[in-house]
Structure formats: C-alpha cells, structure tokens
Amino acid sequence: MTFAPVLDSPADTTPVGGPQLPQERRLVTEIPGPLSREVLARKAAAVPNGVGVTLPIAVVAAGGGVVVDVDGNSLIDLGSGIAVTGVGNAAPEVVAAVTDQVSRFTHTCFTITAYDGYIRVAEALNRLTPGDHDKRTALFNSGAEAVENAVKIARAYTRKQAVVVFDHAYHGRTNLTMAMTAKSMPYKSGFGPFASEVYRVPLSYPFRDGGLSGADAAAAAISQIEKQVGAANLAAVVIEPIQGEGGFIEPALGFLPAIAAWAKDNGVVFVADEIQTGFSRTGHLFASEHEGLVPDLITTAKGIAGGLPLSAVTGRAEIMDAAHAGGLGGTYGGNPVACAAALASIDLFENGGLTERAREIDVVLRGALNALRAADDRIGDVRGRGAMMAIELVEPATGAPDAALTAKIAAFAHAHGVVLLTCGTYGNVIRFLPPLTISDDLLREGVRVVGEALAATPR
C-alpha cells in the first residue's frame, strides 16, 4: 500500500516536499497516528528488531524545518537525519542536480570508468578543507567507511599499526569502527570480537573533568599514549573536534591543537573525524577551523550530499598516495548521483549563506537553552557550536547523569510534534541538530516544547 500525505487547508494547494511545505508544527492525530501505526506494523513484520526507529512515524515529505508524516502531522525537525540534511530536505538545487544526473547515468563504478562528478567533488574538498597544502580525496559511501579507510591510509603511510581514539568517541558500526567507538549499547554489545590495535585515552570533558584546562587534559592523554602505546607503534590519532554521539562534548580550548602538535612531532597521522561537525554545522565550514587545526586527514559524510549516501577522506597528498593502486575504492564509492547531490550541496554551503545561518542558529538556540537552564537546575550544561548544540541533564544534588529524565523529555517532545534526539555515553544528553534552513520561530517553538516537557516532568 502507498500512502500520500494528508494536508489541511490552506496547505492543500502547497506542493509536497522541499521548503515549499508549510513551516509549522501541526498535530492532526496523536503520535503515532493510525496510518503510521499501520506502516510500523509492516516494518515489524519485514525488518529485523535490530533496526530500531526512534520516533514512531512514517514520513512522506520534509523540507525547511519540518517533516510531515503519513497522517498529516507536521513535526519540527531538530534532528535533520542526524546532521545530514543541513541544506534542508529536498532542496531544489539538490533535486535538480540529482534529476539531471539520473537521466544521464546512475552508475559505472569509478574504479572501472571515471567520470567528472567524482573528480569535481574531490577538487572541491581539496580546496575547501583546512590547509593550503597539496591534497587528494577518495570517496566512499558512509562515515564508518571513511574512518576505516583513513586508518588504512595512515597505516600504509606510516607502516605502523596502532590507532588511538578517545573516551566517548563514536566512529561507526563496522568491525574496526566499533572497536574505535566507546559506547557499548547499542553499538557494540554482543558483536565482538573487535579489531585489534585500537587504544582509548581520556578526552577533555569540561563539564565533568573538574575544569581541567585543555593543555593539562592533553598532557594527560599524551602521557597515556606514550606509556601504553608508544609513538613508535602509532599510525594515527583519530578524534572528533566536537564529539557527536558521545554527547556533543567540546574539548577545552587548547586540547585539540596540543594533540595535533604532538602527533606532528612524533610522525603520527592526525585524523579529524568531521562526519557530524562538517559542512557549516558548527558555524564554520569545518569545526577544525575554530582553533586553526590543519588535520593530516579529514573524514566527511552526513551533510556532504543533502541526504544521499556519500563520504570522503581528504588529506595530504603524500599520505593519501601511500596506498597502492587498487587499495582504495569500492563498488558504489563516489556514486555519480550522490556526487551530483554533493556538488549542489557544497555550492549551497559555500555560497548560499548557510555557514552564516549556522551562527544565527547558535545565537537563537544558545539563548533559549540558557534561559531553560536558568529556570531548571536539572540542566547541568549547555554546550556546542552553531546548529550543533546540546543540554546535559543531571540530578541537581549530585550532578549525576539523569538518563531517565532525558528519555521522558524526548518522549514528550515526540508526542508533541518535535523530532528530538538524545545522545551521550550516559544517555543524558539532548542534542539539537536542526537543518540550517529552519526558521527562528520553529527553533524557539521546539525549545519551548522542551521547556514544557521539563515542567511536566516532576522532580
């Protein structure tokens, strides 16, 4: 059975999809509505339990700052597909580029026959990523695939095997990236054994490490690396400039540059995982720019192609060229349709005012979230940058993580028409990842619903 969206007047005459959707929160049924429940019943019969669904609706249209479900409910989108649809869902420029490419050809496999789109995406990333050195880019499908290939490339270049990652990190769900990811449930539990030669060290976590300076936190991490791994054995240090799934943890100023400087001094490849932070999300095109970082390798995905599957590893030419011919690639890596979407999306990030819009979103979100914090001491911390903000919920007397409260707030928001995501090692962080095309009014309304959820949840 195929469903069409149910739209109320005056939306009846509004084309479905993209930013032309009415930009409003509108509930015409309970969440989930009857048609969504029907779709989810089919999901239960056809899809394994391991593929979960956070919010029990079936979406039929999205754009601007809303998603519309099969029952006609319009929800405020504060998740953007986990930071993917930064340019908005069904952005007209992306739709046009994809449509044109589909009419030409959908696939040849770049490692069999080359095409211009792949090369143009590589040229754009070589130009836009931090640093003016000579660069190369290889394209893949997913963030995890990009991280895994970055490790392969670093190992080929250094001829060393060990990889260092950090507490609370999230790098993916493949075998190697599960080993690199910190949180067990739901990402790792029961799926081992995992890849070897992956070592974890402490991260700067200003809210929970007693106000340790970035320099001191870096010194502690470096000391552990030197004692437990050894620079002579270490191929790469891989870090998210602002952690994503781990809780939107932004290291104290100075931490990232100190780690990068140590890596440079010791012949270790410094890899910035910008899969969630990249493409204007934090108010710069890449989060590394906030502290002037120039990574040896940078991994990107999520926001790169407006919702189509694409990822990349970009880095210093001498490092990227270390892998032997045929050592990198894959059947679908750099698919021509995804490349067309990426070129349109990159143009919007670069020339469409979206980086500036992320900074405006920062002002709106930070102000609204700090107002909530001032009124409710269960909000222990407000943090993040741009359109990548978070609140950490705690028990006020002890500062202990309050995962139960977090789950209740998210459930309330979902029932009241707001797509809201949680994260964090302790399950007590609510993250705000709106599309950069969202309006200020929808942002404020979404935060207002979070405030209502707090007010409705007893201490």
Image (spheres, helix red, strand yellow):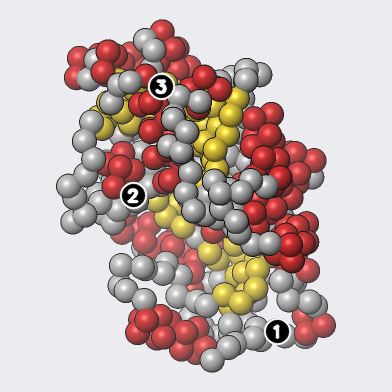
Any part of residue 210 in sight? no
Side of 241 relative to 291 (left or right): left
Determine the image quadrant of residue 94. bottom right
The x, y position of residue 359, in whole percent, is: 68, 38
> From mark 1 to mark 2, how far is it between C-alphas?
40 Å
Reading the image, the residue beneath label 2 is 174
Q: Amino acid at mark 2?
A: Thr
The x, y position of residue 103, in whole percent, is: 74, 66
Which numbered disc flags the more N-terminal residue, 2 or 3? 3
Which numbered disc flags the more N-terminal residue, 1 or 2? 1
Reading the image, the residue beneath label 1 is 7
> From mark 2 to mark 3, how far is it between C-alphas?
22 Å
Q: Residue at x 62, y 69 (%)?
A: 67
Give the label, 2 or 3, closer to the camera: 3
Q: Give whichever of 39, 214 is nearer the camera.
A: 39
Give the label, 1 or 2, closer to the camera: 2
Any part of residue 352 in sight? yes
Side of 420 relative to 180 (left or right): right
Q: Residue at x 56, y 49 (%)?
A: 112
Q: Amino acid at mark 3?
A: Tyr
Q: On screen, 5 above or below 349?
A: below
Name, please, the residue furthest toward the top: 265
Q: Amino acid at mark 1?
A: Leu
Reading the image, the residue beneath label 3 is 157
Which numbered disc flags the more N-terminal residue, 3 or 1? 1
Q: Residue at x 49, y 66 (%)?
A: 413
Instruction: Please tell me whether mark 3 sits on a helix, a strand or a loop.
Output: helix
